Image (cartoon, rainbow, N blue to C red):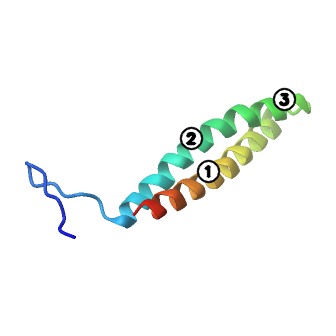
Amino acid sequence: MPVAVGPYGQTQPNCFDRIKMGFMMGFAVGMAAGAMFGTFSCLRVGMRGRELMGGVGKTMMQSGGTFGTFMAIGMGIRC
């Protein structure tokens, strides 16, 4: 299929760029959700200080990676 060119010479992103963009969007949303849920769960079990920051950071990275992976797979299916 021909690549569509806009009025100013820009082209559509290729499939890898779309997958990468989907991962980054999913990672950002997952990190935000992980911050909320991680903070709540760590405070509920009584974590404070450095332990709290480590627990919240771990939860943010895990949820960001998980959601980002699924968003990247979804964008890959749409290519």
Nearer to the camera, 29 or 51: 29
**Residue type at the position of mark 1:** Phe
Q: Residue at x 19, y 64 (%)?
A: 3
Question: In which quadrant of the rendered image does the C terminus lie?
Answer: bottom left
| 11 lies left or right of 75 | left
Identify the residue at the far bottom of this view. 1
Mark 3, residues whose alpha carbon is within 10 Å: few (<14), some, or many (≥20)?
some
Identify the residue at the far right of this view. 45
Q: Earlier in the sequence, mark 2 or mark 3?
A: 2
| 64 lies left or right of 11 | right
**Residue type at the position of mark 3:** Leu
Residue 8, x across and y down, in percent: 8, 49
Q: Residue at x 54, y 48 (%)?
A: 26
Q: How far apart are the alpha carbons under marks 1 and 3?
A: 23 Å
Which of the 4 image quarters holds residue 4?
bottom left
Nearer to the camera, 43 or 2: 2
Residue identified by numbered label 3: 43
Residue 49, x across and y down, in percent: 80, 32
Residue 67, numbered circle:
1
Residues at badges 2 and 1 in contact (C-beta under 8 Å)?
yes
**Residue type at the position of mark 2:** Val
Q: How far apart are the alpha carbons under marks 2 and 1?
A: 8 Å
Whether residue 66 is situated above or below residue 56 in the rendered picture: below
Residue identified by numbered label 2: 29
Of circles 2 and 3, the one toward us is: 2
Nearer to the camera, 56 or 5: 5
Q: Earlier in the sequence, mark 2 or mark 1?
A: 2
Q: How far apart are the alpha carbons under marks 2 and 3?
A: 21 Å
Residue 38, x across and y down, in percent: 75, 37
